[in-house]
Image: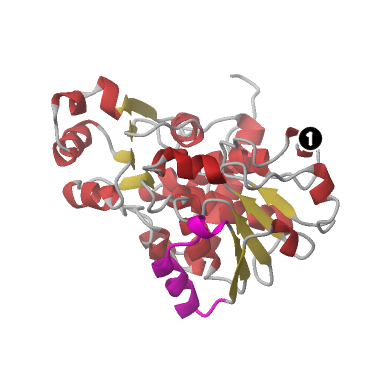
Amino acid sequence: MAGEKSAPKIVGLTPDRRQSFYGRDIVSVKQFSRDDLTYIFGVADEMRSIVKRVGATDLLKGYVLANLFYEPSTRTSSSFIAAMQRLGGSVIPIHGVQYSSVSKGESLPDTIRTLECYADVIVLRHPEVGASEVAARYASKPVISAGDGVGEHPTQGLLDIYTIYTELGTIDGLHVAMVGDLKNGRTVHSLARLLCLYDTKMTFVSPEILRLPPALKEELIQAGRPIAETARVEDVIETVDVLYVTRVQKERFADLREYEAVKGYYEITPALMERAKERMALMHPLPRVGEIHYDVDDDPRAAYFRQVENGLYIRMALLAAVLGKV
Ligand code: ASP
């Protein structure tokens, strides 16, 4: 539109950093270094300023994203669509099971090899751990995991750690407590691994049956991070800088009676928040189903909707990076 401000030019950082993303798959946060995160935070900041100033840019004009979801999603799916559209690209949205040839029995590799004939990048959410790695092996175009079962959710991990950084201005030196379904919560698995890249202390708060998988706990210990476990939020509420609350993952329970027994275990209320530090961040990957009382939403420390917004900037940054535009 005439007279409108033009989109700022995005300046990428060092060529070697570019190599960590350009043409690469994003299937686990284990692939990232601290420098990679600094880089992607910088690009996300630039994406934020583009969206705030002019709404969109044509950086990915002519590029196509295949957005393939075999599990339900609100935020991840729509933020990838919005990210691609705000970068000037377009999207093939596919809700895997119901409306595609998956219902006719087509395999994941065949679906992926088909979609990459049309698209430049594939986003995949799948119920099986490791599915995105399998897809990445078959695809010559970049595959970005949007969550693989109870495994990882790397782009959520990135937006979560970016949110911690934007809320508190640092990651080093923080005490982060993760609360809820630590066994099945893939966002916890990704975030905990990323926090290992910084000088952080982690406390895992859950009932016994929802504790962190032992292999991941061992991984964190090997990384040299101090970790603690407890069943009570009250044990950490006064000392944490970040309280990361999660939903009990009903869809992962074979026996729904077990789910019923633990689903209402935690509820963050205004009364509990009164005991927390004045400067801290209350986060949740969402959806919430009772873990954070709605009366907490107006608390300035409630960061979960800013966290949602950050997801757009991080996914814009990742799409631009894997397609070699930053
Ligand atoms: N939306 C997140 C995920 O897909 C968290 C959740 O579902 O509880 O893992």
Q: How is the image coloured?
A: secondary structure
Q: Is residue 35 above or below residue 287?
A: below
Q: Is residue 140 above or below residue 200?
A: above
Asked whether residue 209 is drawn in magenta, I would say yes
Where's residue 293, x and y in %? 72, 37
Where's residue 187, x and y in %? 49, 51
Asked whether residue 274 is drawn in magenta, I would say no
Residue in view at x 42 percent, y 59 percent: 29
Residue in the foreground of this view, choosing between 46 and 292: 292
Residue in the foreground of this view, choosing between 251 and 254: 254
Quick check: 7 left or right of 111? right
The majority secondary structure of the magenta stretch comes to: helix
Residue in view at x 68 percent, y 59 percent: 232
Residue at which label 1 appears: 295
Visible in this render: residue 236? no
Q: Type of residue at label 1?
A: Asp
How many numbered tags mark residues here?
1
Where's residue 6, x and y in %? 59, 32
Where's residue 140, x and y in %? 20, 47
Quick check: 96 left or right of 44? left
Residue in the foreground of this view, choosing between 85 and 135: 135
Visible in this render: residue 37? yes
Quick check: 255 left or right of 131? right
Q: Quadrant of residue 91?
A: top left
The span shown in magenta is: 207-225
